[in-house]
Amino acid sequence: MKPIMPYIIKDNQAGFIQNRISTDNVLLANEILQHSRKASKFKLLYVKLDIKKAFDSVSREFLIARMVQKGFPNMFVRWIYACIKDVWFFLCIDGALEGLFSSKFGLRHGCPLSPYLFSIVMDALSCLLDCNLHENSFEALSVGNYRLSHLMYVDDLILFGKADLNNYDKLSQTLKDFSLATGLNVNFGKSSIILPHNCVIADNICTSLNITNTSSSMNYLGMPLSPYNPKLANFSQLLESVIKTLSGWKAKALSFAGRLQFLRYTIWNTIAY
């Protein structure tokens, strides 16, 4: 599956797809936020969505149907179905294993197939968001001939769209349709919105999307994003993560060059992962 995934999964998806890098999503999202502050014609709204128990709740029937749509050979699809259907579980109660039951939906964590299969499912949402063939389509960021509705890293999703109530009613309906088909639901409690400056319909948009967390910045893949110039406070969570990683480091055992290299390694891996 690995070599053909870049050809069947939209470019919006950066997770687990060959030759795609997660930091590209962060850089592009930051550029879009900075651009929107200068562009007065198109008031953008940014929505970061969190998928609830993503791998555990995905519909296997939808996955198989989607693989058939993507053109996978029938024998290959049967192999995949055989790999994901025979998953049995025990419950650990007071240190002892009890019961044995099968699973009816979801993908196994840690299985090397699961990220690819989940990307195929999430690609359906990309297709729904990018479909602009009818009047109920989500109105996304558009600059000239360039259109970008969202960026995705596995199930970490950030959307860019016109700050219009009707537009976000369309988005809400799209998410409902996707949820009914795939079994994946948005965790609105962990989702957040960045509203444009002086947005007069902010409360209505939040009600339409059922998201109450609004702010002037958000964390995406561990990095703070904002349409405004970043402040030190925006990086506090990242700095705490780096400091925690370095807390057990014995600096006296390394030369100055070694310390510098270790710092670079730690910080870049913190951002990447």
Image (spheres, grey):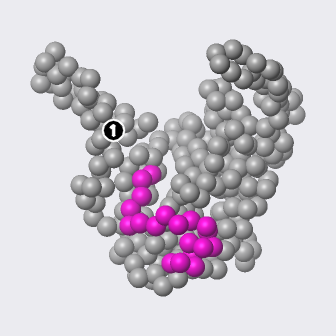
The image quarter in which residue 238 lies: top left
Frontmost residue, 219 versus 97: 97
Residue 166 lies left or right of residue 180; in this view the side is left
The residue sitting at 67% across, 32% down in the picture is 114
- Report helix, strand or loop for mark 1: helix
Relative to 227, residue 42 above or below: below
The residue sitting at 68% across, 53% down in the picture is 185
Q: How would you rate the neighbour count of disc 1 (Cα within 10 Å): few for under 14, some for 14-19, many for 20 or more?
A: some
The image quarter in which residue 189 lies: bottom right
Residue 268 lies left or right of residue 55; in this view the side is left
The image quarter in which residue 84 lies: top right
Residue type of the residue flagged with mark 1: Ser
142 part of magenta stretch? no
Kindly tell me whether residue 193 is visible in this rendering.
yes
Q: How many marks on residues?
A: 1
Percent position of residue 47, x then y: 52, 63
The residue sitting at 35% across, 75% down in the picture is 38
The outermost residue toward the bottom is 200
Percent position of residue 174, x then y: 71, 64
211 part of magenta stretch? yes
Q: From the image, which quarter does the C terminus lie in?
A: top left
The residue sitting at 51% across, 38% down in the picture is 19
Relative to 85, residue 136 above or below: below
Residue 99 lies left or right of residue 11; in this view the side is right
Relative to 49, residue 132 above or below: below
Percent position of residue 156, x then y: 55, 49
Frontmost residue, 210 versus 91: 91
Instruction: Look at mark 1 in the image and give the residue it sits on.
Output: 241
User: What segment is highlighted magenta in the picture?
Assistant: 202-220
